[in-house]
Amino acid sequence: MVSPAASAPLTPADGWQKGFAFTGDSVRLCWREHHEPGVPATRPALLCLAGLTRNGADFAHLAATLGRNWRIIAPDLRGRGESGWARDPLTYVSLTYLRDLSLVMEAAGITRFVVIGSSLGGLLGLRLTTAHRAQMDGMVLIDVGPTIEAQGQARLRANVGRGGNWPTWVHAARDLALRNGDFYPDWTLHDWLDFAKRLCRVGPQGRIVFDYDPRIAEAFRLPQVDAGADDWAAFDSLAGLPVLSLRGELSDVFTAATQAEMQRRLPGMTSVTVPRVGHMPTLAEPVAAGALAQFLDGIANAS
């Protein structure tokens, strides 16, 4: 359960700031924020939600292109990045994540927002409509929709929590390239090094390890863990909002058929396929970056 709790002041870190809030089950939640003084106060914040094993570092590069015009908030879900690990691994489920996100938004003073959600982050964005639809000014869904392909989900379940332990960043990068190379066929070693430094950290023994609690796999592997979630109904509730769907051309999680059904149900949605990328686009790809910039320009002009 999440109870109202004190938030710690923001502290500077590498051009960003970090804020902290605490849940009723004593988990420290961290969010990363980029907020320049010139950003219009009336403009909604960009609430950036990362994928299953990822954290707010996935969105750090957005500061270079969007930071002057938008307040960027990138939470680390419990068990990831600089947020604390839960005592009970069965709290690594959507219901708890949503409560945590409500607490972070309250602590960060977010009154209006646009979700930019990758994979699990996109599903959480959809499910935030239950309590926060009135505060939403837009939704960006990155390689995710209300239907998740069984093959892709099985692959994710097999890989989450799988160990990683490397002596150097180059070793980590090369191993991650072997594991994920089919989804980013054009990446160079430099790209894989950047990826490794977003996904991993230096562990207590000086070796490179994944930057998440491996026990997040326990709840994720349970059958029907989110059986109560009706993501198509949540998606339908976005009617009247600007929505952007970005699909990786090589994705095994989010298909063109699902994106087409989303487009049918929400004709005003903007659908974009990012070439030669699988699950999931990073927003650094020119096609994805251009689509996102155009989408946000539309929201800015309307606000």
Image (cartoon, rainbow, N blue to C red):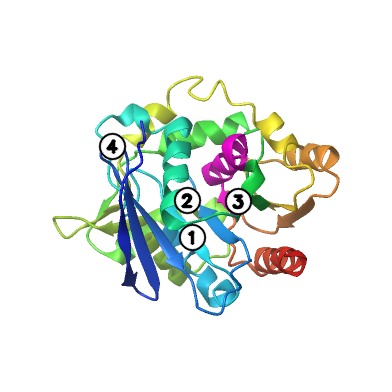
Relative depth, front residue between 212 and 124: 124
Residue interval drawn in magenta: 114-132
Residue type highlighted by circle 2: Met
Per the image, label 3 sits on a secondary structure element best described as loop
Q: Name the residue under label 1.
A: 73
Residue 274, quarter of picture: bottom right
Marks 2 and 1 in Cβ contact (< 8 Å): yes
In magenta segment, residue 125: yes
Q: Residue at x 79, y 54 (%)?
A: 270
C-alpha span from label 4 to label 2: 20 Å
Looking at the image, is mark 3 or mark 4 nearer the viewer?
4
Q: Residue at x 43, y 53 (%)?
A: 75
Location of residue 125 with respect to 69 vertically, above or below: above
Q: Mark 4 points at which residue?
A: 86
Q: Of helix, strand and loop, which one carries label 1?
A: strand
The mark nearer the N terminus, 4 or 1, is 1
Residue 63 vertical placement versus 253 (above, below): below
Residue 275 seen anywhere in this rendered image of the structure: yes
Looking at the rendering, which quadrant does residue 148 occupy? top right
**Front position among marks 3 and 2:** 2
Label 3 is placed on what type of residue? Gly
- 131, above or below 50, in the image: above
Q: Which of marks 2 and 1 is nearer the N terminus?
A: 1
Residue 278, numbered circle = 3
Q: Name the residue under label 2.
A: 105
Residues at badges 3 and 4 in contact (C-beta under 8 Å)? no
Whole-angstrom CA distance, mark 3 to mark 1, is: 25 Å
- Residue type at the position of mark 4: Ala
Residue 260, percent from left and from top: 80, 41
